[in-house]
Amino acid sequence: MINPFPPAFLFILGAVLIPILKGKLKQLYLLMIPAIAFLDIIKLSPGMSWSYRFSGYDLVFCNVDRLSLIIGYIFVIIGFLAILYSIHVKEDGQHIAAFLYIGSSLGVVFSGDFFSLFVFWEIMAVASLFLILYQRKKESLGAGLRYILMHIIGGCSLLAGIIIYTISKGSIAIGIIEPNAAYWFLLLGIGLNTAFIPIHTWLPDAYPEGTITGSVFLSVFTTKTGVYVLARCFPGVEFVAYMGGIMALYGVVFALLQNDARRLLSYHIVSQVGYMVAAVGVGTALSINGAVAHVFNHILYKALLFMSIGSVMYMTGKRKLTEMGGLARFMPVTTIVCIIAALSISGAPGFNGFISKGMILASVAEAHRPILEIMLTLASVGTFLSFIKLGYFAFFAKNYDMKSKESPVNMQLAMMLTAFACVLIGLFPKILFYILPYQDIPYHPYTPGHIVGVIQLFMLAGASFILAKAMVVPHNATILDFDYFYRMGGKVLIWVIMVPLSALRKKLQLFSSVTVSIISRLAKNPISTIEIPIAYIYQRITKGSRYVGGYSSSDTFNENLYRKPVGVGIFLAIILLFVFALVHLIFK
Amino acid sequence: MEKILKRLFLILAALSIPLGFFVEHEHAVFFWHRIPSIEAIFGFFGTFVLILATAILTSFAQKKEHFYD
């Protein structure tokens, strides 16, 4: 009997062996780790916990309850499918980044205290960055830099919140946060990863610039861990509920205007995460169940959408809707799975989105939030419209120049399995209900009123789309988002550093080198004190070149002449640390 | 072919409206839950509201493709 093991470490430690293995063995190994992790999570049961006492605090690396278990299941399932999708990638670095990303996300989910959560949170940010940078394009490098800058700001805010929380409460255990000084710091840090408006800009900026396979991983983990932590720390917060409504609508309006297929999908992450955030903000048992069910379903259909568009990009090299079209004939599998994913995200009956979106809308109505219900229903109309647009322009619009083959077998297999999961949960929602955090909360998705309502919503939205199609035809343009202000702010900051601050630095440097040269001259030869007034008078009379204490502009202090290599400093520091440790050990 | 499909869809959409009179909204909370076929009205007008929102957004936020380069 093997005891279960914290699943995060399976992936993080598992990444070490990736560069050593080669060929088929490596591919087998890559698939084996998530399979083992799945078996491991099945063996975990609520109440289990692994902790380590450190500096007077309990670091809880693995704290198991029903909420962490369901997110753990889906993270490992999608980890397996996304790895299957990317198994043809030769570059080890991409697999290592993906493993660290999955592992650290699982780490966040199973963390029982804020310190270990923070450590995994930061590993997650850095690992995901590499999935963007490996695209190796100018746009990716820029987007990656902006991505990590924003996550550093979010991470600092989270850390500040954690420190204040720990000092004020004397405990680091994760729990519901009371309104105090730590509250807003924590909300900002978690909200950044959850893509709160207006700090969501890293998402539609960076996700479309990731590698084809990397974007599938990106679409899954960061925002969903954000929702998970939000559900742990901020359930039932009014601000969070309405932020969710704003996100749902904001994302959908921006998505309707996008031409880059993956950017369209990225704005839909903002929108769909909005549903989850709204449900967390409502905070009832049904709404938390709805939020978690939506996390589960969203991960499946959003990864499937990124997989299908990635498959088109992989085979055709096209990423814009204006350049695609007519692919249904050449890529039937990709087309069918994309339609399944589109129906799932829209919430069509028979697909998984129908179940969880219905739960969220029902819980919002039950909690008497009329405005929120209207916002989320309107977002649902927009979601359907966006995916008619995506499906039509990518696969069915006339494009006689387009020729392509179907994507590699591993990609097709991963897409088919994910699509199967979407339909399976749509048809047999009890599978999902069985693992939800709150049991005995009755919800019946397939009622006549609900089915007819959704059909009417879609049919009439589709009809008005046909009438107003010209308004949403994709075209090449940039739609400015809030990042305009951040980029302009960045430019102003760089100007302030380059011009006024740099000028001040030069002045200070000149002043100090003049002072140093005078003092050193006086120290060497105090008699020369007399020379200074003479030189000054000489200068006043002749109005000639500046002559003060032997100083001339050519011998300004040049620090590079005196600089020792960094290695020397580090070497000395290591020796001193070693001596210190030795002394400490001997005289303890 | 495309024209026929479009017309068929529009006819089906029109036919879906009376369906709402045969079913009831379970757990009606707000007054609009009791209006028959409210979802059809929402779907139709919601689309125009969203298209209006995108039109307003493009009027000031739409720039050339390589605006940031």
Image (spheres, coloured by chain):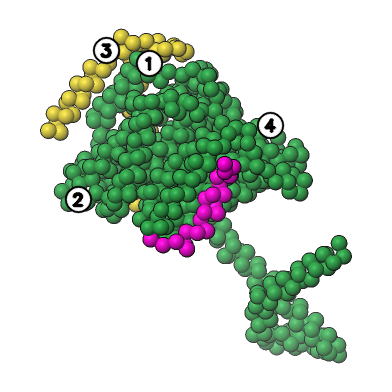
Q: x, y percentage for residue A117?
A: 62, 44
> Label for residue A532?
none
Mark 2 neighbour class, 10 Å CA radius: few under 14, some 14 to 19, many 20 or more: few
Kindly indicate the quadrant of the structure image that contains residue A228. top right
Apparent side of residue A548 relative to residue A422 in the rendered image (left or right): right
Q: Which residues are magenta?
A: A1-23
The Cα atoms of the two marked residues, 4 and 1, are separated by 39 Å
Q: Quick one: quadrant of the N terminus of chain A?
A: top right
The Cα atoms of the two marked residues, 2 and 3, are separated by 42 Å
Same chain for the residues under marks 2 and 4 in the image: yes
Mark 1 neighbour class, 10 Å CA radius: few under 14, some 14 to 19, many 20 or more: few
Q: x, y percentage for residue A345?
A: 37, 33
Whether label 2 touches label 4, CB < 8 Å:
no
Kind of element beneath mark 1: loop
Question: Which residue is at a point 32% across and 49% down the rendered structure image?
Answer: A410
The Cα atoms of the two marked residues, 4 and 3, are separated by 50 Å
* Chain identity of mark 1: A
Q: Between tags 1 and 2, which lies in front? A: 1
Q: Amino acid at mark 3?
A: Pro
Tag 4 residue: A178
Q: Amino acid at mark 4?
A: Glu
Instruction: Give the vertical position of A127 relative to A367 (above or below).
Output: below
